[in-house]
Image (cartoon, rainbow, N blue to C red):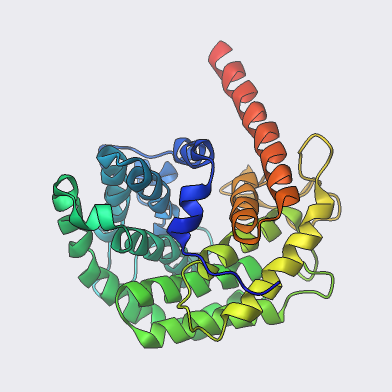
Amino acid sequence: MAAPTASEWDVLAAIDPGLLNFQVQLVDVDRRNGAINENRDIFISVGMQRHSSKPIAYGILTKNTGLIDTGIKILEYAFARQSADGSFPSFLPEGAEGIPRSVSFFFQDLGRSFLLAQNSSWFQSSSQTKGLRDRMNKLIPPATKSLHWLISQEGTLKKHDRSATNRLFFHALAYYLVGKATRRPDAIKIGENFARMALKQQSKEGFFPENRGYDTSYNGVSLQQALILYTNLDANSSLRQDLWQGIERSVAWQKNFFLPSGELATTGNTRIRTGGERFLRRKKTVDYVPLIVAFNYYSKLSGDSTVQMLADRTFAFYRESKERTTRRERER
């Protein structure tokens, strides 16, 4: 099909609000200062602060200024730890090599938050949001400084993250969205180049490779990032048609890996599997939310009801599984 035209706000307004609220509830944030997860006790990595856009999106959609405030605090907590050159300290096991990646992961969320705020007429005009607007605007100068530093790290990111396509999409968003929000054509071009690099790696079957094979969980992450990028592309972007075709092929492949229950099959995965990867000593599990969000975005853009049906079934399965786990923990 021809590449559809819709903004991210067009898509978000059509999605089940329950899914967007579920995303927000999964964010482990200290609402007093914006610290996320392990960053609560001691700052470990700016990449962990990449969750501001969830409360900001749902907050703007529902006109909940408290949620928007939380999202902005997540960003402010990160920038309070910015280094003089625009980078951020990192205490992850990967050391200095991982700092550009961590900043990029944070930036893809930062850029999305900027654009969601900039493209909301209510947020930009309501007397309720004036203080929030002022705080967002104060983040533009430090973001510009960090973007300048991140541009200098383009080669490092390409060198180290070539084998993980989802990371290339993260980098595409980081440069493109923050570049668009801060009016930096050079960053936008770098973002488009990362997206084309990711598309070039797409397999003939349609999946986006991870460690030279497929991974049904990480493919969902790639799809979500690709669709967020797509809904934020300029109307005349030369990337639009190629990106949409890549998304269509990836969705067609991904549809084959759902069990009747809605659970995502992981047999044959290169990363999320039995005996697979760990992060900070914890076993990585299926990252189901990005996949569900991606299928919702695609369904709304394409009108494909079968994709929406899969998204709804998968959401029901994992939401019920999450509720069972929560009940067991409370009973201990």
Q: Quadrant of the C terminus?
A: top right
Q: Tell me where residue 287 appears, x and y as whole percent.
A: 64, 47
| Horizontal arrangement in the rendering, residue 165 relative to residue 24 (left or right) | right
Tell me if residue 103 comes above or below residue 260 in the rendering: below
Viewer can see residue 332: no
Give the residue drawn at x 43%, y 44%. Answer: 38
Q: Tell me where residue 152 appears, x and y as whole percent.
A: 40, 85
Q: Quadrant of the N terminus?
A: bottom right
Q: Tell me where residue 293 appears, x and y as whole percent.
A: 59, 50
Give the residue drawn at x 79%, y 74%. Answer: 203
Q: Tell me where residue 231 appears, x and y as whole percent.
A: 50, 66
| Horizontal arrangement in the rendering, residue 68 relative to residue 4 (left or right) | left
| Horizontal arrangement in the rendering, residue 25 relative to residue 180 (left or right) | right
Give the residue drawn at x 40%, y 66%. Answer: 107
Tell me if residue 330 comes above or below residue 222 in the rendering: above
Q: How many circles with numbers are drawn on the protein?
A: 0
Viewer can see residue 309: yes
Give the residue drawn at x 79%, y 54%. Answer: 255
Viewer-proximal residue among 226 and 209: 226
Tell me if residue 316 comes above or below residue 231 in the rendering: above
> Residue placed farthest to the top in the image?
331
Image quadrant in which you'd find residue 146:
bottom left
Viewer-proximal residue among 209 and 92: 209
Viewer-proximal residue among 101 and 255: 255
